[in-house]
Image (tube, grey):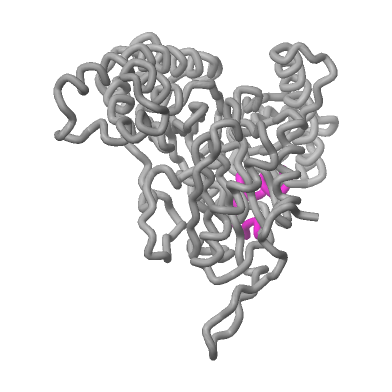
Amino acid sequence: MSLFSRKKKDVLPEKPGKKPKDPDDYLLALDIGTEYVKALIAKKSKGDIKIVGVGKAHEAPTNMSSGAIADIQGVAKTCEEALVKAEEMAGVRSKEVVVGIAGELIKGNTASIKYRRADSNKAINDDEMAKIIKAVQQKAGERARREVALETNNPDVEVRLINSALVSLRIDGHKVSNPIGFKGSEVIVQIYTAFAPLVHISAIERVCDELQLDLVTVAVEPFAVCRACLGDDLDSNFSGIVMDIGGGTTDIAIVDDGGVEGTKMFSIGGRSFTHQISEKLGLSFEDAEKLKLLADSPDMKPEIRKRFDQAIARNLEVWQAGVELAIEEFEHVETLPNQILLCGGGASLSEIPELLATGDWYKDLPFSRRPIISLIEPEDVPGIINATDRELDHTFVTAMGLLRVGIDTLVGTTNNGLRAKIARLLKN
């Protein structure tokens, strides 16, 4: 039995004369962050996704650790608080949910496999593509398990596939836009896959059980941000680096010509800056967080400004080093996209985008020129409309991406392009 007050009633009270809303028509996205839980309720659609409910609640300090759930009951309580706010605004109870996951033990990489066909004169069909995809996912899963086992010193660790997406596909060296029906002897396919330790997935499943929600899917958060940027055009040629700077982690993903090349994460986020401010200025954590959010205020006294800058300077250096190391790990990317898109609460600290925009950190990385830095604003996210009177900002972009992943999972697509066909196979 659930320990929480939220009851499993599908429909909230409606105004007299209004038809009750069907909960099956709506989808909930839960962005469970280190500092906040954000909840968005949207009406399911193959067209524009309309957000009709918004909720946000502050996490207790011990609820999360490095982006992963540390206290199931504490996180469930915070989720309920955000969820109730969103449901009251939407006028409907949530049933189906997509949840984000982050942390250094989430392994998102692009795996490539060369497949030699037995009969080069036979046209490729869906069954053969499914066989190839399964082989790539198995190869990627073995790699992810080895990496997590090494980092946790646990040779028996279990991992689970979370997300898959096509990066590229070639037949006899020729890049194709749709493999079905082609003939040839050699198929080389690259697929992005993300795996997470089973313990993290089971914690999310338990939270959903406590809240009496049906878990549609779990999505790696930087992958969700990529989906937000790509929208419903699965043949998009969008290229860029996305950085989701949360409270406990910084999540980085690279998209090249519409394909997710990989995701990397490291455990430095906005909370580490707050701790430095608290320590150097002798403030409580709560007061340090308030001061951080007012960092751009012209009313900050000069002596406070000087100590504030000194407090975050060292952290900025460490964070920058983390960004460089994470991007260096994308070894198969010959030239990096020249635009970097930021979201998450940590991006609100103006020193972070300023550092990326003006520093020389990029010179030892394969950029063709200095990258352009910008925030991802909700109005920049294609195909998702905020139909509420609540103003959303860049801190809600991850939750918007989760909605996109959830709709992908639930309704699929009628598009006949390469990524649309492969997306259907990847979900099997």
**Relative side of 178 to 293, left or right:** right
Q: Position of residue 31 (x, y in %)?
A: 55, 44
The residue lying toward the viewer, choosing from 175 and 35, is 35
Q: Main secondary structure of the magenta part?
A: helix
Q: In terms of image quadrants, where is residue 418? A: top right
Q: Residue at 76% x, 43% y: name it.
A: 123
Image spot of residue 49 (x, y percent): 51, 61
Is 412 in the magenta? yes
266 or 296: which is nearer to us? 296
Q: Position of residue 422 (x, y in %)?
A: 67, 44
| Residue 418 seen in this snapshot | no
In the rendered structure, the answer to whether residue 281 lies left or right of residue 80 reads: left
* Residue 258 visible, this angle: yes
Residue at 54% x, 32% y is 61
Which segment is the magenta one?
411-426
Residue at point 76% right, 38% down? 202
> Does residue 185 appear left or right of residue 175 in this picture?
right
Residue 388 spot, x, y in % from top left: 42, 65
**113 shown above or below 329:** below
| Residue 413 lies in the magenta stretch | yes
